[in-house]
Amino acid sequence: MTEETVLHHKARFERPAEYPERFPVPDRFVGWENDYPDYAPPYYVSPAVLLNDASRNPGGWADPEDLSLSYGSPEESFAGRLRHDDKGRALNPFGRTGIAGRGLLGKWGPNYAADPVITCIDPGDNSVKLLAVQRKDNGQWAIPGGMVDKGEEISRTLTRELLEETGVALDMNRGRLVYQGYVDDPRNTDHAWMETTAKHLHLDLETARRLDLKAGSDARAVRWFALTPENICKLYASHSSLVKAALVGLARGAQAGITESERECVERLLQSL
């Protein structure tokens, strides 16, 4: 994906409650290559991010607000080589968002996450189910993912986040890569944005039923979430796209052990989307 071919939507039209109103960004002015002389986005960095400024707080998880105190702005991400503004700050590779600064995100440039997509199929009602958590901040159902710690391997993050948020211990090294790149997220700004690595692991029903689900501190609830067209569309941020990518692979037989009837069940769901 590139900013020339795909326009982010959530990053322009949605925002967390604490963000200021986004400056309007019409489609024709999204890309940085298109001159937008009137563009005047509000600058916002969450107080929570500033409190965790690593240059002031030894235990802080956020980059210094003063870019000169950090290791510099990143030159590339999963999206490729990055543009920079006249202050040396990396620019969102998918274009303008209507807000400058970092918002709720701690890192200048890409903020890396990992999303474990865990599914099963219940032949009793021919439904595909997703292991999902209900977020405390907005009540939306989501993939149980989280941020990659500094120096942490992606597979370790996937396994750790799954355990922390759902109480489930699975080896995500067994998962199949379904996506790695930019995420159209309501938290994104011109200078900070989400990128993720999503891996999919499909479980047989017996294994799924044996799992002892326990919601972590960041979740209201955890459960096997029935994937209907309506429910998929309501998933948090761009999680619907990650789930669809996992389902496409499942329908193509990318996961071992899936039966023909289960594959047909997945195909019917995809056709209804």
Image: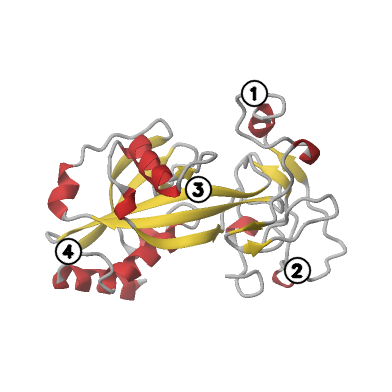
Q: Which one is in front in this view, the residue at disc 2 or the one at disc 4?
A: 4
Q: Which one is in front in this view, the residue at disc 3 or the one at disc 2?
A: 3
Q: Amino acid at mark 2?
A: Phe
Crowdedness near tag 2: few (<14), some (14–19) or many (≥20) residues, C-alpha within 10 Å: some
Instruction: Say which residue appears at 71% left-offset and 52% top-offset.
Output: 22
* Among the two numbered marks 3 and 2 on one chain, the one whose residue lies closer to the N terminus: 2
Q: Amino acid at mark 1?
A: Pro
| Whether label 3 touches label 2, CB < 8 Å | no
* Among the two numbered marks 2 and 4 on one chain, the one whose residue lies closer to the N terminus: 2
Q: Which residue is mark 4?
A: 257
| Label of residue 15 in the image | none
Q: Nearer the viewer, residue 110 or 184?
A: 110
Label 4 – label 1 distance at C-alpha? 48 Å
| Label of residue 58 in the image | 1
**From the viewer's perspective, is 153 left or right of 61?**
left
Circle 1 sits in a helix, a strand or a loop, which is it? Answer: loop
Q: Position of residue 195 (x, y in %)?
A: 55, 54
Label 1 – label 2 distance at C-alpha? 40 Å
Crowdedness near tag 4: few (<14), some (14–19) or many (≥20) residues, C-alpha within 10 Å: few
Q: Position of residue 227 (x, y in %)?
A: 30, 59
Q: Which residue is mark 3?
A: 113
Instruction: Say which residue appears at 87% left-offset and 64% top-offset.
Output: 37
Label 1 – label 3 distance at C-alpha? 23 Å
Q: Is residue 21 above or below residue 246?
A: above
| Whether label 4 touches label 3, CB < 8 Å | no
Q: Which residue is mark 2?
A: 29
| Whether label 2 touches label 4, CB < 8 Å | no
Q: Amino acid at mark 4?
A: Gly
* Among the two numbered marks 1 and 3 on one chain, the one whose residue lies closer to the N terminus: 1
Q: Quadrant of residue 101?
A: top right
Q: Is residue 226 visible?
A: no
On the rendered image, what quadrant is the C terminus found in?
bottom left
